[in-house]
Image: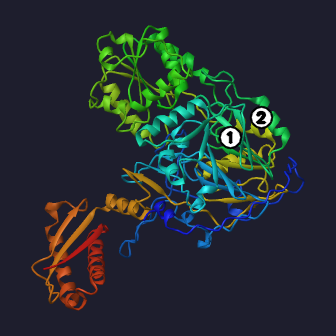
């Protein structure tokens, strides 16, 4: 029974009584605010704890995760644990206490210790809303996992309290969990989002054949969801139709920025709505939950329009095909590439189902401008001169299964790199991907192509606010509390340091983790609970959800590091005595031709254990017998090789 199907079998918790005091807006700058951080280890500017670096994600900053475990050389291997083992269990194993009457509760469900699976909930009395429902792409330790989503077990037994889901924009780290999570929470729950975001969500739902209750909104709309009054404000990002959210509650107003930046010259989008944000600040804001992705970088984020001239120069000089690698969701960049292709008389080939779907949806909704005959197929492009073709595809991070890498390796069915091609990496290199990108560029040059990335020319502009953008927003909103979200812990700490430049201290800054619970009282004071909401790894593996636990992933990790050593033993059902010799098979542990002597010694050890304990323990205590064999062989293998493969023991009666 996995973490979600267990909802159906657990008794429902008693409902909490509703109590709604009169709204009280807090003062923007109280003289002595309540300290929301009883634990000083979460205070800025405390540096991040040392962690191993494992990067593989779709944001432009480091993604740090702790290793699954450390090798214990003095004894048989202990099981590996998950990367955030300490925070994956509620403090002291105590459940989160019921919400007190007259208080608002915020639960950070995901996106606080990683990049991805962004989701946060607001709860008042017996009503709750959820903002965003994203996925996280796996790092190299999530063996065989397609991706992960946030843990929503806080709402187990009280799914009916969820009155609405609000989606800030259409990127997968904000919408990717919807097909997997909404059937568990309830497909009837209203989901509010802008037109482009709604269309992207509905396209993903076609495969699952689920019907969602989508309510399309515009940034100027105000909606009522239970005790919450929701307003929106226009922000800029690398995809059109992104919004920030204002959550009006009986205890005051709260702001969630979503992914954002300030772009005074956006591509096919409207300018950041300074006027409305100013009015929101004048109404009073209890807490602002702000995107931390690029906040550690000084300065203002570059406008998407700033990329046009460098790209124009590339199109002007290119004599053969232009091949551009970028993210399928970066519709603003794709729009510029299509526009320049039309300007220089080139046809455009889109490679990849997601990229093609995104562009067609955006064009149909008039978020992109594409001439009727600009987009062509690969087969049509092969009939044109090379200087008449632009190919836009995924793979700027050197991903092994992406179209650009497959084309470079000659493994793509329709596209191969040709001498004279100009290949543009129109994104920054995510830390951790430098080696794979470097190898890809080596391959491109060996094939006679020319490669260009953002270090050579300004062919990329980020989609997330930098340090000065954040300071501008905080000076306008003037929230009582600053809460950095969306990023690894060290990014949240760096974001807190930026907020300190405009007056926020450890008493007015809350740095949360996944599962953090913060209660706000009617006076606008914040109370960070010691208890945590459930925040386990919920893995999507093939068609399964939640049935691959952290222990399964740990086992996969152990096998990938050290291999497996399988022992098969056949015993007499009547006497428990060994029949014949044990059989040993190993994979990924030691070269087979050199393992004969080692295997013979291991067989002797197994035989000795069986002779001493087999008749006594079989068949009533088979697990104990297996454990004895496993322990003895583990110690022997480590003594001989200083390696500790996963030892599996099978005992069959005959």
Q: Find residue 551 and report its horizontal and vertical position in percent.
A: 41, 65
Marking on residue 257: 1
Residue 280 in which image quadrant? top right
Determine the residue located farthest toward the right in the rendered image: 31
Between residues 69 and 154, which one lies in front from this camera angle? 154
Expressed as whole percent of the image width and height from the top left, the position of residue 178 reads 51, 45
Q: Mark 2 points at which residue?
A: 277
Give the secondary structure at mark 1.
Answer: loop
Asked whether residue 572 appears in the rendered view, the answer is: yes
The image shows residue 429, relative to residue 460, as above or below, that is: below
Q: Where, quadrant-wise, is the C terminus in this rendering? A: bottom left
Q: Residue 27 carries which label?
A: none
Task: Give the class, few, some or many, for how many residues have Cα within 10 Å of label 2's Cα (few <14, many ≥20).
Answer: many
Q: Tell me which label, 1 or 2, sits earlier in the chain.
A: 1
With respect to residue 572, does 160 lie above or below? Answer: above
Between 247 and 334, the one nearer to me in the picture: 247
């Amino acid at each position: 029974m996995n973490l979600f199907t267990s909802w159906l079998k657990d008794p429902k918790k008693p409902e909490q009584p509703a109590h709604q005091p009169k709204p009280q807006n807090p003062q923007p700058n109280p003289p002595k605010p309540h300290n929301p951080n009883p634990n000083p280890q979460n205070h800025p500017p405390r540096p991040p704890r040392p962690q191993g670096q494992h990067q593989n994600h779709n944001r432009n900053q480091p993604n740090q995760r702790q290793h699954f475990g450390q090798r214990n050389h003095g004894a048989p291997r202990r099981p590996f644990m998950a990367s955030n083992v300490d925070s994956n269990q509620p403090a002291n194993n105590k459940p989160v206490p019921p919400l007190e009457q007259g208080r608002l509760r915020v639960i950070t469900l995901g996106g606080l210790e990683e990049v991805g699976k962004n989701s946060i909930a607001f709860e008042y009395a017996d009503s709750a809303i959820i903002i965003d429902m994203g996925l996280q792409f796996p790092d190299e330790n999530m063996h065989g996992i397609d991706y992960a989503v946030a843990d929503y077990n806080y709402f187990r037994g009280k799914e009916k309290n969820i009155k609405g889901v609000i989606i800030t924009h259409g990127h997968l780290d904000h919408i990717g969990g919807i097909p997997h999570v909404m059937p568990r929470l309830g497909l009837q729950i209203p989901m509010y989002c802008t037109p482009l975001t709604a269309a992207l969500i509905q396209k993903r739902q076609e495969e699952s054949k689920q019907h969602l209750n989508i309510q399309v909104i515009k940034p100027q709309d105000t909606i009522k969801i239970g005790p919450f009054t929701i307003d929106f404000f226009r922000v800029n990002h690398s995809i059109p139709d992104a919004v920030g959210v204002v959550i009006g509650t009986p205890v005051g107003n709260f702001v969630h920025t979503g992914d954002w930046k300030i772009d005074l010259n956006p591509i096919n989008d409207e300018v950041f709505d300074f006027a409305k944000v100013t009015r929101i600040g004048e109404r009073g804001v209890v807490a602002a939950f702000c995107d931390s992705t690029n906040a550690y970088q000084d300065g203002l984020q570059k406008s998407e329009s700033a990329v046009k001239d460098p790209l124009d120069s590339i199109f002007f000089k290119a004599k053969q095909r232009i091949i551009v690698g970028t993210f399928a969701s970066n519709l603003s960049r794709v729009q510029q590439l299509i526009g320049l292709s039309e300007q220089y008389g080139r046809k455009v080939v889109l490679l990849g189902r997601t990229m093609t779907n995104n562009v067609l949806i955006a064009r149909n909704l008039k978020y992109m401008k594409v001439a009727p005959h600009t987009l062509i197929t690969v087969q049509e492009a092969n009939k044109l001169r090379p200087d008449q073709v632009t190919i836009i595809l995924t793979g700027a991070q050197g991903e092994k299964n992406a179209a650009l890498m497959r084309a470079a390796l000659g493994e793509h069915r329709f596209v191969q790199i040709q001498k004279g091609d100009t290949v543009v990496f129109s994104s920054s290199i995510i830390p951790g991907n430098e080696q794979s990108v470097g190898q890809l560029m080596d391959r491109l040059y060996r094939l006679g192509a020319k490669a260009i990335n953002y270090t050579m020319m300004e062919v990329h502009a980020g989609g997330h606010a930098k340090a000065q953008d954040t300071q501008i927003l905080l000076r306008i909103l003037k929230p009582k509390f600053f809460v950095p979200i969306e990023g690894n812990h060290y990014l949240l700490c760096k974001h807190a340091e930026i907020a300190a430049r405009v007056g926020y201290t450890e008493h007015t800054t809350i740095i949360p983790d996944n599962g953090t619970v913060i209660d706000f009282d009617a006076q606008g004071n914040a109370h960070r609970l010691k208890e945590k909401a459930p925040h386990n790894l919920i893995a999507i593996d093939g068609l399964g959800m939640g049935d691959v636990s952290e222990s399964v992933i740990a086992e996969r990790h152990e096998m990938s590091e050290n291999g497996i050593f399988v022992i098969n033993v056949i015993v007499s059902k009547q006497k428990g005595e060994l029949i014949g010799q044990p059989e040993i098979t190993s994979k990924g542990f030691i070269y087979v031709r050199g393992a004969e002597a080692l295997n013979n010694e291991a067989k002797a050890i197994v035989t000795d254990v069986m002779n001493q304990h087999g008749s006594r323990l079989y068949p009533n205590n088979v697990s104990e017998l297996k454990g004895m064999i496993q322990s003895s062989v583990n110690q022997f293998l480590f003594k001989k090789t200083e390696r500790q493969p996963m030892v599996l023991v099978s005992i069959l009666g005959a």
